[in-house]
Image: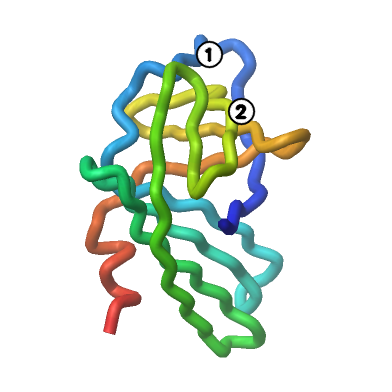
């Protein structure tokens, strides 16, 4: 399982784990204009995740695809047997704690992920 590390939060906003996780989420780490990493995860109602990982190194794009299973129980999200704590789940943000690492995903359109399928 791949998790991308990004971090941004506003501690003044109330967090909730009660939102709907179904849909497509994106995390991005950009180190320069031609060096970046994006991870898309589409949570499907049937308990599966379609995952697309896109890396750009010196302008060269590499795309990997993977499939996972998921389940959610309260603020616990389990992906392929590995459990994360949901810190925030709203219509726009998914923030997870995996161990000591905070991961931030933003909701995005399916078409943004679909452009990487051949």
Q: Viewer-proximal residue, 90 or 44?
A: 44
The quadrant holding residue 65 is: bottom left
In the picture, measured across the screen, residue 70 lies left or right of residue 111, that is right
In the picture, measured across the screen, residue 97 lies left or right of residue 75, that is right
Q: Is residue 76 above or below residue 30?
A: above
Q: Going 24% across and 57% down the picture, which residue do you hit?
A: 110
In the picture, measured across the screen, residue 83 lies left or right of residue 111, that is right
Q: Going 62% across and 79% down the picture, which residue do you hit?
A: 34
Label 2 secondary element: loop
Q: Which residue position holds label 1?
A: 13
Q: Going 52% across and 84% down the picture, which residue do you hit?
A: 61
Residue 75, how many percent across, how many down?
A: 49, 20
Q: Going 34% across and 34% down the picture, which residue do you hit?
A: 21
Q: Is residue 16 above or below residue 108?
A: above
Q: Which residue position holds label 2?
A: 9
In the picture, measured across the screen, residue 19 lies left or right of residue 66, that is left
Label 2: how many Cα within 10 Å (few below 14, some 14–19, many 20+): few
Residue 28, how many percent across, how many down?
A: 55, 56
The reply to whether dot 2 and dot 1 touch (C-beta < 8 Å) is: yes
Residue 109, how many percent across, how many down?
A: 26, 52
Residue 115, how many percent across, how many down?
A: 29, 73
Q: CA distance from mark 2 to mark 1?
A: 8 Å
The quadrant holding residue 1 is: bottom right
């Amino acid at each position: 399982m791949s998790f991308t590390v990004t971090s941004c939060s506003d501690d003044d906003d109330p967090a909730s784990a009660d939102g709907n996780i179904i849909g497509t989420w994106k995390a991005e780490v950009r180190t320069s204009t031609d060096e970046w990493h994006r991870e898309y995860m589409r949570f499907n109602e049937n308990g599966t995740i379609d995952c697309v990982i896109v890396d750009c190194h010196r302008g060269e794009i590499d795309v990997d695809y993977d499939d996972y299973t998921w389940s959610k129980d309260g603020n616990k999200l389990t992906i392929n047997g590995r459990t994360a704590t949901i810190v925030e789940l709203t219509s726009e943000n998914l923030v997870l704690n995996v161990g000591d690492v905070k991961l931030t995903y933003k909701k995005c359109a399916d078409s943004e992920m679909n452009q990487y399928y051949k």
